Each structure stands twice: as structure tokens, then as C-alpha cells.
Image (spheres, helix red, strand yellow):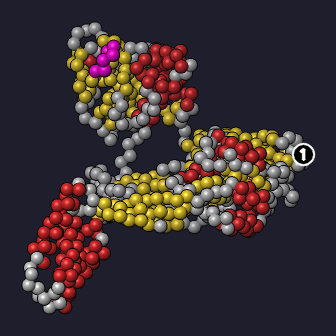
């Protein structure tokens, strides 16, 4: 239903003025006495001319037509259908559920209701690998925002394995729940959980603990096996005594790379499903821990603080070399060397193969040696006394990210050389010196990275007090540990000079997400270049390769692979730059995360609680008629929605038609009556 009327945004004086002007112009034309038509005909012609002039004059005022459109909106009863795999996992026919849902939809539409069906993945097939009921209801509310949503009909078995409990959600509309599935626990055996280290070291033996869940098979003996590439690594016979028990395997890793192990348990004929009788175990085997050497001129509490932080991560192997104590210099290759009390007379050690270096300066350090050996840092000392300063984190520091830096401000002060500081080259300040409440521009800790070598400099020692104080206040030393480990991580990573960098964003992904690869191409002077055609090959273990091509650009340098089935994959990418071909390689794993089969017992009590909380009601799937009658009693009303639009009159074609007809009519009548 539409209504329209003309709206003029001018005062009545302007309107009166154009009316007077139209009257005067018409009068001037038709005030002559010698005309071939009579007085009545003259009045008719004058009136037509007046209306024509008035129609043209109104356009000069830029009027608008206010159009009001009334739309009748039917009440919406949205069916939020849980189309996860668990709905049909116990043998319920998918077609029968679809038939019942469509019957409900048709019955509600006969009540003059709008009934959309919304699912997890916009498909009515029961193929969703996870159940997030809170997100499903939010999806309904988001899609129908601003529309006449009256009720949400949640059709589900009440099983959720993603997101928060739907019971804690604040519902905007009443939720009428429709119980699907079977509330009786099935007879089943499953591997409900796997516990193991995702990263292990070459040569280590790794424990793998498996939780076995069963119902209805007490005292039954079953066989558990652990396989890799079809070969049985280990097996155990176990007797099912409890509803939940743990089984442990131990495997040794001899080679670097990704491993996919498959744990399985005997399938018994009358189980409700066999899908949960096996579980994948994905491990990454690395060559060994990073090696860190601390070189000092004397024992110091800082050394213990740094070592304890690094060793508790399990990723670092630390050693200490103090010349006055150790007779023999270390002869190994280290990833990072920390010089504690650097540039003092007692330290004389040259590391092999350009590791990352961390210099920790003490009061005995030679300023002359610092300026000579660290060209990116210059200290102009003023006086012989040190300065006591605290640290303040540089929020613009970009080399690595430290999430929470609040503890830095409360750390005890350290002694630094008193003087003027300047830095140069590819150097960033990680911490500024802080005097009282004043944050200076002088560095307390800097990081240098020129692409060939990495160096960190801390201009004061006694940082063991930082760890001690933070532990006393917070009962942990997370901030201190984070600073140490992030610095060592940065220094230990070798700079990559490859001209093609094709790296998978996540080495371990699930089969519900596609692999993403970051693409970087550089020319001979290591400038980033784009619009390169890159040939990509992805090969599964024991399978056929898939080939792709990708052209990177300044706005898109991420290759998105199609989703892949579970397994371990190797990839390679190549690009031609001039007359040379560059290649990069790697591997990743795709894990099958299928929680739908871990619990197949429908939870209709949860649905009752959701409906009670939101002001709705619970019905079983067999109570379709009661459901329809209940919604009839709700007397859901349609809503009239009014929408106003202002349409400029100059855009209305029919107004020009009126003007044309008025002038045409006048011209025709004058000719017909013998005028000119």
C-alpha cells in the first residue's frame, strides 16, 4: 500500500509569489478583448495557461514528493536446524528427518507464517562436522535482524562440541526446542581422547596416552593397535573394566619431520558406530633443542635466572663458560651466545658460525670497547658514576611481540653507564631508560638486525632481581620469562636469504579449514617483487600430486589451497626470476577432528532448560501436532512496516507529462477556436 503527497520546503510567501506571477502572466495574455472565442472559452484558456506556468514554476522551488510505502510483514518462525553428523550417526534416516522438518514448515506456512530453515553450513544435508548451538542461534538472529522474527524453532539433539553452552546465551526471542536423536546411551566403544606431545625431539621416546570409553561391554577383551603407514608399531590387549580407562603406548622418533600415527580399537558388530574406534596422532619431530651458551667472567645470579627460564621451556640446551673456572673453551656450534659482563678483561671467546649474540653490560665493561665493537651503539660517558634506571617498554618495537609489559615498569632499577647514547643502522630500542616517572629516549635494551647478523644489548645487569620481584608479587615470573625467551627466539632464528619463500601458515591444520601459504618473492638485491607466476605441487603420503599455479600481487600474496583429507602432505613451489628458477619446499599435516561421534546420547534436558529460560517450550520430534497447536495459541500477528522516501519532483517523469499536456491543450484549443 503506497501513499504520496507533494512536500515543499519553502515558506508560504514563496508559493504565493509564484501563484501571483502565474496569474499575472496568464492575465496579460488573455486580457485582450478582440478574440475569436467567447468569454467562457477565454477563461478556460487562461486557466490552462495559469496551470501550465504554475507547474513549471513549482520545479524552480525543487519540491519533493513524500512517498509512504506500507508493507505487511508476516511473523517469522525460523527453524534453526542442527544438521551435524551426530543427528544421523545412530542410524536415523536422513530422509525421514528432512520429511518431518518440511511437514512442520508447510503446516506453519498455512498459518500465514514465514518459515526459513537455517543450518550450520546453509545445507540441509546432515554433513556438519561440528555442533555449535550458540553460534547457530546467533546466525538466525543475525540473518533476520530488523525483520519480524517472532520465534526460533531449534531442532537438535542437544549435543554441542564447539562454542559455549547454549544455556548461558541471552536469547532475543523465545526458543521452541524440538528434540531429535535418542536419549538412551548406545552400546559403544570409542577412543575419546588422545594425550601426547605435539613436538618431540629426534631420538626421544614419546608416550601416547589414549582414553578408551565404553558402555555395554564390561569385561570384554579388545585389541588396541598403533600403526604408521599401515605398519603395526605396537599393540596391546586390554580388558574393558571401567566406563573410562587409559592405555599408553611409547614410540621412538628416529627421523625429522611430521608423523601420522593411527590408534585403533577392535570393532564389535553391535556397536552404534565404528567412526570413533580410531584416532589420529600427529607429531612433529625436530632435530634437537636450540643450543645457548652463556659466557661470563665470573658466576652471577643472572646466569641462573636466564638458564632456569630457558630450560623450563624444554626447547633450549644451555651451557656456561667462565674462563677462570673452565679450563677448556667450548668447541660446539651454538645458536645463541650470551656475553654476561660483556667487554670486560676476563672474557675472551669467539663463537663459531655467526650465532645470535646478546651482550649484557656490567659496571666493569669498557665503554671504549663497546663503542669499538658495536658500531650501531655509541655511548659518550659523563662522569665515572653509573646511573640507576628502570625499564619502559617501547610500544613501537616490531621485531617480536610481547603481549603484556606492565611488569617492566615495576622492575627494580639496574645500573647503566651515565652519559649520552646514540644508535644507528637497523637498530630498534626494546626498552627505554626510565628515571623516576620520566621516560627518557636513552636505550636500556636494543636489538640490531642487518639481515646477516642479529645482536641484542642490555645495558645493565642484575636482572635476576626482576625475576625475583615479579615472582614475589604475581606468584610467577611470566613477564620476565617472556622477555628472555622471545629475545632468544629472535636471536636464534637465522635470517632467510631465499628469493622465493613459500611457507605454510600453520603446519598442523584440521580438515575443516583450507591450507594457507604465504608467498614472498625477491629480486637479486632482495627487493620484494610481485606478479610472479608460481608453480605449486602438493603431494600426500602415498598419493598423487596436485598441481596449481598462483600469481602473487601487492594486494594478494596468500595462496589458498582447496581443503584436503587427513594426512601428511609435502609441497614445493617454484618461480622463474630472469633466467633462474628458485624453489622452496616444506610439509604440513591435516588432522581429522571429528567430535560428532564421541558422544551420541541426545541431551533433551538441555533443550528443556533453553526453552524455559527463553520463554518457549520443549517438544519431542514425535509431537509435531502439539507443536503446531502451541504456535497457534501464540496468536502471532503480522506487522505493518511503513517506509518513507523523498523523491525530488524533477525526477518524476509524469510531472513533465502534465506540463506537456497543459501547453499542448492550450495550443490545440487556440488553433481550434481560430486563434494563433
Query: Does the segment drawn in magenta span residue 646?
Result: no
Left or right position of 591 against 263: left
Which residue bears the numbered disc 1? 218
Pick whichever, 240 or 126, lies toward us: 126
Left or right position of 309 against 120: left
| Residue sitting at x 29%, y 15% | 417
Residue 646 place in picture, x, y as percent: 34, 61
Q: Quadrant of residue 446?
A: top left
Left or right position of 458 against 42: right
Residue 53 place in picture, x, y as percent: 18, 72
Q: Is residue 612 visible?
A: yes
| Residue sitting at x 83%, y 50% | 185
Q: Residue reaching furthest right? A: 219
Pick whichever, 593 or 542, lies toward us: 593
Pick whichever, 48 or 205, lies toward us: 48
The range drawn in magenta is: 435-440
Q: Is residue 74 above or below residue 493?
A: below
| Residue sitting at x 25%, y 35% | 425
Residue 224 place in picture, x, y as percent: 79, 49
| Residue sitting at x 28%, y 8% | 385
Q: Principal SS element in the magenta part?
A: strand
Query: Does the segment drawn in magenta span residue 438?
Result: yes
Q: Is residue 343 visible?
A: no
Say few, some or many: other residues with alpha carbon within 10 Å of mark 1 (under 14 / 14 to 19 / 20 or more): few
Left or right position of 565 against 276: left
Q: Is residue 611 above or below residue 14?
A: above
Residue 553 place in picture, x, y as percent: 34, 59
Amino acid at each position: 500500500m503506497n501513499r504520496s503527497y507533494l512536500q515543499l520546503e519553502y515558506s508560504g510567501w514563496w508559493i504565493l509569489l509564484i501563484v501571483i506571477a502565474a496569474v499575472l502572466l496568464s492575465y496579460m495574455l488573455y486580457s485582450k478583448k478582440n478574440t475569436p472565442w467567447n468569454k467562457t472559452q477565454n477563461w478556460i484558456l487562461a486557466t490552462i495557461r495559469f496551470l501550465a506556468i504554475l507547474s513549471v514554476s513549482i520545479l524552480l522551488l525543487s519540491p519533493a514528493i513524500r512517498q509512504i510505502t506500507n508493507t505487511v510483514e508476516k511473523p517469522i518462525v525460523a527453524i534453526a536446524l542442527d544438521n551435524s553428523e551426530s543427528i544421523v550417526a545412530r542410524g536415523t534416516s536422513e530422509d525421514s528427518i528432512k520429511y518431518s522438518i518440511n511437514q512442520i514448515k508447510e503446516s506453519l506456512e498455512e498459518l500465514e507464517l514465514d518459515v526459513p530453515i537455517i543450518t550450520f553450513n546453509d545445507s540441509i544435508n546432515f554433513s556438519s562436522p561440528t555442533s555449535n548451538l550458540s553460534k547457530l542461534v546467533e546466525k538466525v538472529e543475525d540473518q533476520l535482524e530488523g525483520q519480524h522474527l517472532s520465534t526460533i524453532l531449534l531442532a537438535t539433539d542437544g549435543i554441542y562440541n564447539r562454542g559455549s553452552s547454549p544455556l548461558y546465551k541471552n536469547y532475543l526471542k523465545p526458543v521452541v526446542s524440538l528434540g531429535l536423536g535418542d536419549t538412551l546411551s548406545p552400546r559403544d566403544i570409542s577412543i575419546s581422547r588422545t594425550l601426547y606431545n605435539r613436538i618431540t625431539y629426534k631420538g626421544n621416546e614419546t608416550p601416547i596416552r589414549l582414553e578408551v570409553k565404553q558402555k555395554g561391554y564390561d569385561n570384554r577383551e579388545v585389541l588396541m593397535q598403533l600403526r604408521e603407514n599401515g605398519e603395526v608399531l605396537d599393540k596391546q590387549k586390554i580388558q574393558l573394566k571401567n566406563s573410562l580407562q587409559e592405555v599408553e603406548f611409547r614410540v621412538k622418533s628416529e627421523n625429522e619431520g611430521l608423523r601420522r600415527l593411527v590408534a585403533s580399537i577392535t570393532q564389535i558388530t553391535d556397536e552404534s558406530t565404528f567412526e570413533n574406534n580410531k584416532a589420529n596422532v600427529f607429531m612433529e619431530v625436530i632435530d634437537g633443542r636450540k643450543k645457548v651458551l652463556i659466557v661470563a667472567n665470573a658466576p652471577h645470579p643472572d646466569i641462573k635466572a636466564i638458564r632456569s627460564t630457558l630450560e623450563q621451556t624444554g626447547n633450549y640446551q644451555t651451557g656456561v663458560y667462565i674462563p677462570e673456572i673452565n679450563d677448556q673453551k667450548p668447541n660446539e656450534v651454538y645458536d645463541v651466545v650470551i656475553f654476561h659482563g660483556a667487554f670486560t678483561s676476563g672474557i675472551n671467546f669467539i663463537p663459531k658460525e655467526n650465532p645470535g649474540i646478546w651482550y649484557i653490560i656490567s659496571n666493569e665493561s669498557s665503554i671504549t670497547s663497546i663503542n669499538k665493537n658495536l658500531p650501531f651503539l655509541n655511548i659518550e660517558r659523563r662522569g665515572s658514576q653509573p646511573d640507576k634506571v628502570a625499564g619502559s617498554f617501547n610500544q613501537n618495537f616490531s621485531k617480536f611481540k610481547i603481549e603484556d609489559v606492565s611488569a617492566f615498569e615495576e622492575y627494580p632499577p639496574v645500573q647503566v653507564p651515565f652519559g649520552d647514547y646514540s644508535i644507528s643502522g637497523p637498530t630498534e630500542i626494546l626498552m627505554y631508560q626510565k628515571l623516576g616517572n620520566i621516560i627518557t629516549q636513552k636505550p636500556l635494551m636494543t636489538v640490531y638486525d642487518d639481515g646477516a647478523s642479529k645482536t641484542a644489548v642490555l645495558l645493565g645487569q642484575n636482572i635476576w632481581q626482576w625475576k625475583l620481584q615479579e615472582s614475589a608479587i604475581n606468584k610467577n615470573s611470566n613477564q620476565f620469562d617472556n622477555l628472555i625467551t622471545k629475545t632468544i627466539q629472535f636471536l636464534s632464528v637465522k635470517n632467510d636469504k631465499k628469493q622465493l619463500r613459500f611457507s605454510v601458515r600453520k603446519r598442523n591444520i584440521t580438515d575443516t579449514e583450507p591450507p594457507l601459504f604465504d608467498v614472498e618473492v625477491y629480486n637479486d638485491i632482495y627487493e620484494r617483487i610481485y606478479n610472479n607466476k608460481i608453480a605449486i605441487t602438493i603431494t600426500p603420503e602415498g598419493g598423487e600430486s596436485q598441481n596449481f599455479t598462483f600469481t602473487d600481487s601487492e594486494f594478494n600474496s596468500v595462496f589458498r589451497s582447496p581443503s584436503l583429507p587427513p594426512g601428511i602432505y609435502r609441497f614445493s613451489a617454484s618461480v622463474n626470476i630472469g633466467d633462474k628458477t628458485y624453489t622452496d619446499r616444506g610439509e604440513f599435516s591435516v588432522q581429522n577432528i571429528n567430535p560428532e561421534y564421541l558422544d551420541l546420547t541426545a541431551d533433551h534436558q538441555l533443550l528443556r532448560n533453553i526453552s524455559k529460560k527463553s520463554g518457549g517450550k520443549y517438544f519431542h520430534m514425535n509431537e509435531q501436532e502439539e507443536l503446531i497447536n502451541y504456535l497457534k495459541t501464540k496468536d502471532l500477528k503480522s506487522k505493518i512496516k511503513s517506509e518513507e522516501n523523498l523523491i525530488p519532483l524533477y525526477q518524476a517523469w509524469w510531472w513533465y507529462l502534465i506540463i506537456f499536456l497543459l501547453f499542448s491543450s492550450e495550443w490545440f484549443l487556440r488553433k481550434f477556436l481560430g486563434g494563433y
